[in-house]
Amino acid sequence: MRPRERRETGEQDLFRSRLDQIIDMKHPLVTLGRAVDWRFLEERFGEVYTDSPGQPPLPTRLMAGLAILKHTYDLSDEVLCERWVENPYYQYFCGEEFFQHRLVFDRSSLTRWRTRMGEERLQALIQESLSVATRTKAIKPSELSRVIVDTTVQPKNVTFPTDAKLLNRAREKLVRLAQLHAVPLRQSYARVGKFALVQHQRYAHAKQFRRANRMLKKLRTYLGRIIRDIGRKIEGNGGLEGAFAKLLSLARRVREQQQRQRGPKVYSLHAPEVECIGKGKAHRPYEFGVKVSVATTLRHCKGGQFVTHVKALPGNPYDGHTLATVIPDMEALVGNTIARIFADKGYRGHNAPPDYKFRVFLSGQKRGVTPRIKRELRRRSAVEPVIGHLKAEHRMGRNYLWFRRGDAANAVLAAAGYNFRRLIRWLSLLLCQILTALFPQPLISPD
């Protein structure tokens, strides 16, 4: 064997021996799976289970790991199931000891698990992500005492609502439900209703609003006829009245609501909890969903800008009136006293607890602002890119989960996915540093 070949062979053996030392750290998900305190999550999530007859529940590590992976990599339930079968790192992170060639759970198990946990218990995922960040030195505990708070809108998976679309949709759903329960209708208005909707859209596009309003009146008339016809046919039948009660109530609200009325309006029939929220954006004057409060660390920590608290706020409250709820929840989640809170001018006249009246600083504030606080106020806008990442990469940009509990759960899971994404990146950097320390120079010379 030539000397050069012997040298290359010895270098390759040295490379293999050193590589064996770090084989357990070859993927960030492996390291993250070992860093997470699964016992803590089992204690929090296991509170909803009881020892009773029936099928035993799926392992907590499996379901919690799937929820983390789903919102970390922005996957739907169907795509998550496909990736889990083909990715050994996903399976290891979820607690599998051997590679599985088929699903060990059903896709609908994810939906049932989210519903069973609820917002309060899902907060444990954010708490654990911050705990892992502290243990891996991605964030210092002292950095959790200064936070930035802001609100955004989590849009629901609904089409842009118009009066014409809502009226026609309510009529279609009532006709379909009547056919399902074999309730004979005098007329369904399927053909003329669709034609009136198309005509309204054409007239509105051409700015012929008098003709458009005439078509809108027709759609409202068709819906009223269907409502009254169904009411006559099901009168006295308790079973049918119960089956039609919710949809008839929504249809009546859609038919009677006016453009400038006060109080809640119906913007979607399959998601009546949707609210219309205007945040003053030029490109998007109105958004339809729920308001969400987001809190992040003031400083850009070693591991990145972590989310410390997220909460859905139904009812579209004034931003400043959310601090009375957000601050105690944040302190309970972080386990640290909040020293300073930085917010924008939308929080003027806030209702923070009495002990925090002089710990909340707003953009443009002059009184009580020291030079250090003035420098820190310049970091207030650092929460905006975090909100952008939550929406673009962690499923907060469009919420597909049903009802208000779905709004709350999706916001919390998006924040947990964002934090774990930062941790995966941080662990990848640590792995690169370890590799650089073990191999300070190339083992095989380029010549």
Image (cartoon, helix red, strand yellow):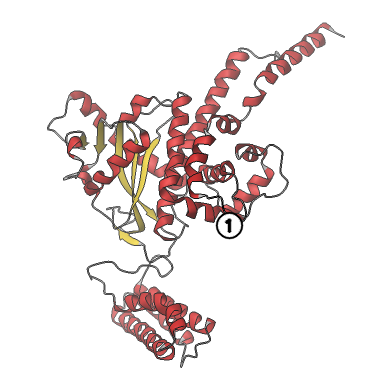
Q: Among all residues in the image, which is located at the extreme front? A: 52
Q: Among all residues in the image, which is located at the extreme right? A: 1
- Which is nearer the eye, 232 or 143? 232
- The amino acid pointed to by label 1 is Ser
Relative height, residue 45 to residue 439 (above, below): below
Q: Position of residue 93 (x, y in %)?
A: 60, 37
Instruction: Tell me which residue sits at (42%, 82%) in the image.
Output: 241
Instruction: Tell me which residue sits at (17%, 34%) in the image.
Output: 358
Observer able to see residue 388: yes
- State which quarter of the image contains the C terminus: top right
Instruction: Tell me which residue sits at (46%, 46%) in the image.
Output: 413
Relative height, residue 21 to residue 348 (above, below): above
Position of 133 compared to 213: left or right? right
Q: Which residue is disc 1 drawn over? A: 108
SS type, badge 1: helix
Q: Position of residue 364 (x, y in %)?
A: 18, 37
Q: Among all residues in the image, which is located at the extreme top? A: 3
- Which is nearer the eye, 246 or 223? 246
Q: Position of residue 419 (x, y in %)?
A: 45, 37
Q: Where is residue 265 in the image (x, y as percent from the top left)?
A: 30, 68
Relative height, residue 226 to residue 245 (above, below): below
- State which quarter of the image contains the N terminus: top right
Q: Among all residues in the image, which is located at the extreme left? A: 367
Location of residue 437 by image quarter: top right
**CA neighbours of label 1 inside 10 A, class few (<14), some (14 to 19), many (20+):** few
Observer able to see residue 164: no
